[in-house]
Each structure stands twice: as C-alpha cells, then as structure tokens.
Image (spheres, grey):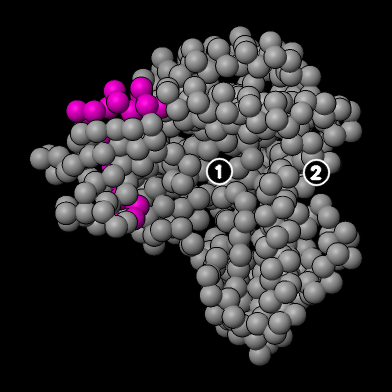
Amino acid sequence: MKDRKVIHFVTLGCSKNLVDSEHLMKQIELSGYKVTHNSDKISSGTVIVNTCGFIRDAKQESIDTILELAQAKIDGRIQGLYVMGCLSQLYKDELKNEIPEVDQFFGVNNFEEILKDIGIGYNRELLNERIQTTPKHFAYLKISEGCDRTCAFCSIPTIRGRHTSISIEILKAEAQKLADQGVKELIVIAQDITYYGLDIYKEQRLAALLKELVTIKDLEWIRLHYAYPHKFPQDVIRVMKENPKICRYLDIPFQHISDKVLKQMKRGNNRSQAVELIQQLRQELPGIALRTTMLVGHPGETEQDFNELLEFVKETKFDRLGVFPYSHEDHSYAFDHYQDEIPDEIKEARVEAIMQLQQEISAEINHSKIGKTLRVIIDQKESEYWIGRTEFDSPEVDNEVLIPISTDLKIGRFYDVKIINANEYDLLGELSDEN
C-alpha cells in the first residue's frame, strides 16, 4: 500500500460528510500521501468513497459511484478502493458480498481503522486540522455527531449513533484555525444544533458556543444550519439579536404542520408551537431569512393534511424552502411500524404543488429587494457574472446574486451591491457607489 502515494477522496451527501472527509484527508496528507478531492481525473492510486445512505436517491448515487470505481479497479485504472460513511455503516455485509472489488468497508466513525488499513497511524494531535475543500472564504464547522431525536422517517440515529457534542474549547480552536487560513464565513452544522451541549454540559449550550465564536476577529458571518423546532433555545435568539456577525438566517426544518402527521412523524411539537416560534423569530429578529424543509407523502398523510400544509406554506412565506417525497427507509421507526401506502405519483404531485407555490413566493420576496443595497460575498466567477450571496443565503442551496463580469471584483471579498432586477431564485446587482 505504501507505494500508492496518491489517495483520491470522493464525498457524497451532506456537508457533515464533507467535514469528515476533510479531517481524514489531513491525517493522510501529513503521512506523506498526495490527496485529491472529488477530482474529475482519477486514473491511478487509491480511492476512498465517503457515502450517503439517508434516502433512496442518495443510496443509489452512492452505489452507482462504488460500482463505477469497482470497474475502474478491474480495468487497472486504480489500485485500491475503500468505502466509508452512512451507506457502508448500514449495509456493510451486503455490500461486501455484492461488490467484492472493494478492499474494505468502514462505517461512519472508523477513522482509526481506515488509517490503520492503509498503513497510517491516527494522530490525535491533528484533531483541529483539516484540508479545506470549500472555497477559501467559507467553511463548515460540525459541532456534534449523531442524534437523539426519534423522528419516525429518519434512520440517522441508527447510522450515526447517539448525539455527541464536541467541546466548546475544541470547536473554538478549530474555528480560529479556519479564520487564520482565510475563512470569513463559518457555517455551523450538525444533525441538530439546538441539542448541542446536553450530553456533555447537561444543558443546551449553543448560545454559549456562539458567544465564543463571535469573538474570533476575522470571522464576519456565522450561519446556523439544522435547528430542531421543538424546545428551541431562547438564549440563541438573544445571542443572534445582540451579535451582527451571526447571520439573520436560520435553517429550521419543520417537516409538516398537520398535528396528526407531526404525531405520526414523532416530531415532538405541534402546529401552534411551530407558528408561535416563527412569529417570535420574525418579531425579535426583523428581516431574518427562514429556510425550512417539508416532507410530503408520509404514512398517514391525507389529502386534507397536505392541503393544510400547502395553506401553511402560502401563509407563512418562508424565504427558502425545500420539499422531499417520503422515502420508506429501513432502520427507521416508520419502516417497522407503518405501511408506505401513498403512491409515488401522488407524492411527486404534492412535491410539485409545494415547489410551484414556493417559486411564486420566492419571486415575490426577491422582487421586493429591487432597489435595495445588500452586502454580498463573492463565491466564484462564471462566464458573464460574478456569483455572490447575501447573509440570507447559504452556499449551494439558496439564492445567488449575479454581478456583471465587467466589474472588477475579488472572490472571498464583501461588497455593497444594489439590486437592479430579480427572478424566482436569483438577484441581479451592480456595485454600489458606497464601496
């Protein structure tokens, strides 16, 4: 193995997987290997695939990727193939039998075993070290592993295990290192950021963590992803209100609004609590952009339940919204206790109805920004435009601001941009005279 000096990483799935890959890549690089990530040109060496196993489509993408690389090994184009992550955690034995070309399968928390198998010792002193695969100016900070929630549709607790928080001291040190390397925007992520601290501090400590992160001088934006609505910590709202570094943005998946469906989903909250939380967030944090996720076609969802959800989306006007059809996942409560009785065509029709409505809402919100000047960070340069984002938009999943390429801008820098036009999902801007 030692003569194979190139190791390619292929990361599938969510940003939490990405952080895992980044930490593992650094361990490997510092042991003398050349490391690449999601390269289009894999023609030698060894490949490590970090898989996703959350829903049906993600599983299929992971399997297709493994099969493609297994063929590359058969053809002699790569010499080694390892698989890690969520899919491997769930189906290790089945995958071993079906794809024998893979040298070894590992789960989600097997860093030491992976390194040992390729001839590298695990270095605990590198706990805060990682190879950043995102653009230099933003990075993800994963604050915990696993989940203690019991949502019926979700297999994450089975895959990732119980919620395990990382200490404030370790997270602050990692964030400081990222800032020292040029990160301006830190995106705080976990399966459930609002649960943070309950295991090691015996109380919710997200607010305490944020108070430490805002003291890091070179960080300009701190963004919060995946907050659970049930028992949302009130002190987080106060910290967001007091600290302009924390973006007026919150990703908070509500999943549904029908009390009956929420109970079936085992979400722990009800409609009135959700409405009250949304009203509080918008009242205490004026202008906040709320991103949410909805799940349609869950077992037990009737046409009446869906229409209630559709009306809720229409009334609430979320700034950002994603919707998914229910996927009957093994290793979930729903798989063992419910029948997946709603036809796929009905699920897809419900997805389409909500997305059509959200498209209209997004167009209305975006057009209201014409004439306003917003602070924008530049992410990349494309053929005719610089591509940027406001504090109300997260990378890859939200709206973008397009600025004509004729303007001389720099990636990773902030600019005041006047919005001159808009469509459903993008804003068109020009550099403000205030710069």
Who is closer to the viewer here, 140 or 38?
Answer: 38
Rendering quarter of residue 372: top left
Q: Write down the region rendered in magenta.
A: 362-381
What secondary structure is marked by label 1? strand
- What residue is at 77 percent from the left and 25 percent from the top? 342
What's the amino acid at mark 1?
Answer: Ile
Asked if the stretch drawn in magenta spans residue 425, the answer is: no
Q: Which mark is residue 27?
A: none
Residue behind mark 1: 189
- The picture places residue 238, in percent across and down from the top left corner, at 44, 24
What secondary structure is marked by label 2? helix
- What residue is at 84 percent from the left and 41 percent from the top? 331
Left or right: 240, with 225 as reference point = left
Q: CA–CA distance between discs 1 and 2?
A: 19 Å
Left or right: 150, with 27 as reference point = right
Asked if the stretch drawn in magenta spans residue 374, the answer is: yes
Residue behind mark 2: 158
The answer to whether 287 is drawn above or below residue 249 in the figure is above
Who is closer to the viewer here, 405 or 115?
Answer: 405
Find the residue positioned furthest to the left.
433
The answer to whether 151 is drawn above or below residue 48 in the figure is above
The answer to whether 223 is drawn above or below residue 289 in the figure is below
* Label 1 environment density (alpha carbons within 10 Å; few <14, some 14–19, many ≥20): many
- The picture places residue 294, in percent across and down from the top left corner, at 61, 27
What's the amino acid at mark 2?
Answer: Thr
* Label 2 environment density (alpha carbons within 10 Å; few <14, some 14–19, many ≥20): some
Contact between labelled residues 2 and 1, with CB atoms less than 8 Å apart: no
Rendering quarter of residue 274: top right
Quadrant where the image shows the N terminus: bottom right
- What residue is at 46 percent from the left and 46 percent from the top? 396
Q: Earlier in the sequence, mark 1 or mark 2?
A: 2
